[in-house]
Image: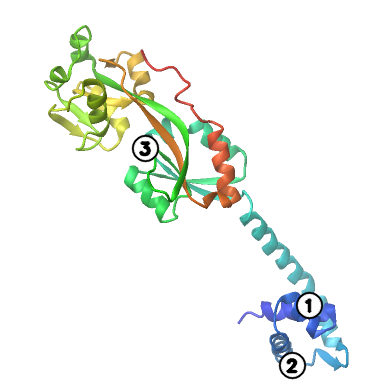
Amino acid sequence: MSYLTQLKTFVEVYRSGNITRAAARLHMSQPAVTSHIQAMENIVGKELFVRKARGVEPTAVADDLALQVAGHIDTLEQKVASIRSRASTDHGTLHLAGPAEYLSVVAGPALANLLQADKVNLVIHTGNKNNTFQLLENDIAELAIMASEPAEGRYEYQLLDKERLILVMNRVQGKLLENREVTAELLNQHKVVTYDEQLPLIRRYFSDVFNASCESPVAAVCPDIRAISSIIKAGVGYSVLPDYLCKEGIANGELVPLGQRGPENGIYLVWKKGALRHPRVDFAKDVIMAFANMNYLSTYPD
């Protein structure tokens, strides 16, 4: 059995010399304090205090016990106070959720700066939009990076960055088409590689640029957008990718950009209402937002 609580009570009574004052300082009732002292007296087998008209007087046994334990109790109190103080400030572990491709390709400087402040440790969760919302809803993630604006009123957010959608094709087929007018009908004759069966980025591009739907045969469905770029570079079909995932491939001639530049998507830093009351989350939000528009301010591929 642990007697730390009773020892703490004993030290406070010893120092104050009064049950009533000790109870007030400990935010306890007088009967509870008396019970703790009686418990300690049972443990040591000796009387610790002599009751007087205006308080209590320690016995020699109490003097010896206080000498042995008071310093240790003070040290433990200081440790707990330190932990409590850190828990209420900007120190600690932050859980951040978001798309793996943006976190790995674009967000590195912001995350590195956050870690270099030596206040916050990071646990990063990757996933799609639905997974990310679930992590926020379940209070697993405190901040999230998302490529869609939250519609629900329980979330707050700031615009963190923008991405442009670019139509790219493998270099063999792309070279044959780069001097032709690119239309929905032309693309529908070629295979497409997509993020999921709903063709989210491709559908958005076709709607905004062609005012048409995509009817291309699906060559592959790949939930990691980074891998889509690799599949196309290997010679399979076309897709629509965020600019930051195809800049290098275009520059190296491994991907061929076709058609008009696509629409822009906003990228948002999102949190549940009330989350910024915690200084750690507010601090992390400010650091990440200090690196806003990392992708948008860089040059889009031609």
Q: Please name the residue that numbered disc 1 is placed on.
A: 12
Q: Can the viewer see residue 249 in this picture?
A: yes
Q: CA distance from mark 2 to mark 3?
A: 69 Å
**Coloring scheme of the render?**
rainbow
Residue that appears at 79% across and 84% down: 20
Indicate the position of residue 212 as horizontal and vertical percent values: 18, 25
In the image, taking residue 226 as reference, residue 286 lies left or right, namely right
Compare residues 99 and 130 and report the one nearer the observer: 130
In the image, taking residue 173 as reference, residue 113 lies left or right, namely right
Q: Residues within 10 Å of mark 1 (few under 14, many from 20)?
A: many
Q: Please name the residue that numbered disc 3 is placed on.
A: 148
Q: What element does badge 2 sit on?
A: loop
Please state which of the two labelled residues, at mark 1 or mark 3, is closer to the viewer. 3
Residue that appears at 41% across and 56% down: 138
Residue that appears at 58% across and 48% down: 280
In the image, taking residue 187 as reference, residue 7 lies left or right, namely right
Q: Please name the residue that numbered disc 2 is placed on.
A: 45
Indicate the position of residue 214 as horizontal and vertical percent values: 17, 27
